[in-house]
Image (tube, rainbow, N blue to C red):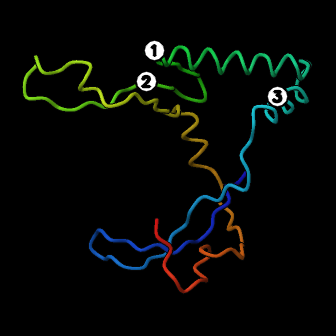
Amino acid sequence: MAINYVRVRRRIAVGQTPGVKFLARCFRSHDVTMDTIAKEISNATTVSYPDVLACLKALEIAVSAHVLNGSAVKFNYLGHFIPSIQAKACDTLEEVDISTIKRAKCRFYPSVAFMKDLAKTQFVLKDLEVKGYQGETPEVIEP
């Protein structure tokens, strides 16, 4: 397995050497849907496609329900989905209430095993003839 990347031109405004720079960015040619995953699991096991799809949908519903209720959801290999909040800092304890909470978030923390496998991933340069990629255009592409 390998991750495709492209070379892009960016204007960097911060740091010791600001200016036009080139860097690698992950290139996703397409996103994988639950339907695709269900077909792959069905082909690799004896479980039928509709049954796999039903289980994946139930997993999606269960994970989101637990996170929305404030619980972390932990998968052994994949990692953890952990709810968190972003809140305004206050000077006194009494000032902290529901109005100081700005928004709820869900963070994903990969497991150690998944991170080790990710560290071994190969990278392949995706050769594209697309404006803004590969540094071939003279104009600076803003982030």
17 or 60, which lies in front?
Answer: 60
Q: Distance between the residues labelled 2 and 3?
A: 26 Å
Callout 1 amino acid: Ser
Callout 3 amino acid: Ala
135 or 65, which lies in front?
Answer: 65
For the residues bearing labels 1 and 2, Cβ distance under 8 angstroms: yes
Mark 3 burial class by Cα count in 10 Å: few <14, some 14-19, many 20+: many
Q: Which residue is drawn at 53% across and 20% down?
A: 74
SS class, disc 3: helix
Point out the tag, 3 or 1, that comes first from the N-terminus.
3
Q: Distance between the residues labelled 3 and 1?
A: 26 Å
Q: In this view, does 94 lie to the left or right of 115?
A: left
Point out the tag, 2 or 3, that comes first from the N-terminus.
3
Asked which quadrant contains residue 6, the reply is: bottom right
Q: Distance between the residues labelled 1 and 2?
A: 7 Å
Q: Is residue 30 left or right of residue 139?
A: right
Q: Position of residue 14 (x, y in %)?
A: 30, 68
Asked which quadrant contains residue 124, the reply is: bottom right
Point out the tag, 1 or 2, that comes first from the N-terminus.
1
In the picture shown, does residue 78 fall above or below 122?
A: above
Q: Mark number for residue 83?
A: 2
For label 3, the residue is 38
Q: In this view, does 88 lie to the left or right of 129?
A: left
Q: Which residue is drawn at 67% across and 68% down?
A: 125
SS class, disc 2: strand
Q: Residue at x 81, y 22 (%)?
A: 53
Q: Mark number for residue 71?
A: 1
